[in-house]
Amino acid sequence: MSKLPLRPTAIIGVVNSLRKTSDRPLLVAGQLADVLARELRAGGDASAVRTGGPPSDVEALVYVVGDDVTDEDEQVLKAARRARVPTVVVAAGREAPVRVPFVLATDVVRVPTGHGFPVDEIARVVMHKLGEEGSSLARRLPVLRKPFCSELIESFARKNGIVGVAVFVPGADLPVLTLNQLRMVLRICAAYGLEVDAQRAPEIAATIGAGLGFRTIARELLGVIPVAGWLLKGAVAYAGTRALGEAAVRYCEART
C-alpha cells in the first residue's frame, strides 16, 4: 500500500470532524407536507423528518407552496432565512408562482401538473444545498443517500481539478488532493452508516492509496507536455477523484 502524503494529525482531524455531525431532522412543511414527508422517510428513520414546528433547530427545510405564495408561506420562509436554515421550495400548484421570496431560483423544484412529487430531484437539490453536512441525513434517509454521494463526489472532483491546475510546485498538491479525497471517502462511509474505527482505517487508507496512481500519471504528463500538462494534470485530478468516490460508494454498498 502506498504511503499517504499526510501527517497523522491531519487524518485524525478529519475523522474527528465527522464525529461532530448533527442529528437534527429535516423539516417538511406547507401543502401536502405529510405526503412528501412519507416519501422522504421511505425505508429510513421516521424521526429524521419532522412536519411540525418552526424552522429552527433543523438541518434543512423543504417547503411546499401551491398556486400562490401566501402571507403564511412568506413568514415561514423569512423565519428560515433569518435562522440560516438551508431551504428548498417545492412549487406544486397548477400555476406555480414565478418568483418565491427568500430563496434562490435554483432552490425551487417545480412539479409538473398531474405529477407526483419528484422525490429524486428534491433530494438532489437538498443535498446540493447541504454539501458535506448532508451526511447525517443521508445516513438516516436512504432516499437521500445516492443524491448526497453524487453531489459530494462532483464537488470534491471539481475542487481537486482546480488544485491540480493551480498548484505549480511538483508534489505540493499531494497533501491537499489526498486530504480532500480522505474527507470525501469518510463522508461517504458516514452516509452509509459505516463506523470509522481502528479496524476499518487500513481498508480506507488502501482505498485512498489507489488514487495515488492517478497523480503519478499527472506528473508524467506534465513532464512530457509542460505547457498543456497543467490542464491535463487538473483533468486527471478531477477524473481520479471521481473514480475514487465511485469506488468508495461500491465499497460501502457491499458492506451494508
Image: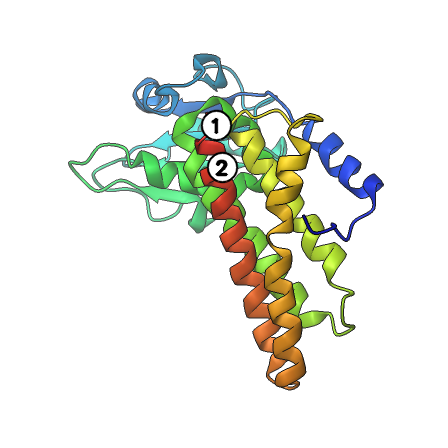
Instruction: Report crowding for label 1: few under 14, some 14 to 19, many 20 or more residues within 10 A (C-alpha).
Output: few
Q: Residue at x 53, y 21 (%)?
A: 25
Image quadrant in which you'd find residue 116: top left
Q: Which residue is mark 2?
A: 251
199 and 185: which is toward the camera: 199
Q: Is residue 94 above or below residue 30?
A: below
| Circles 2 and 1 in contact, beta carbons < 8 Å | yes
Q: Which residue is mark 1?
A: 255
Q: Position of residue 145 (x, y in %)?
A: 45, 33
Left or right? Give the position of 203 relative to 242: right
187 and 127: which is toward the camera: 187
Image quadrant in which you'd find residue 218: bottom right
Per the model, the C-alpha gap separating discs 2 and 1 is 7 Å
Q: Position of residue 46 (x, y in %)?
A: 43, 13
Q: Residue at x 53, y 31 (%)?
A: 191
Q: Amino acid at mark 2?
A: Tyr
Q: Residue at x 78, y 37 (%)?
A: 13
Q: Secondary structure at mark 2?
A: helix
Instruction: Say whether residue 101 is visible.
Output: no
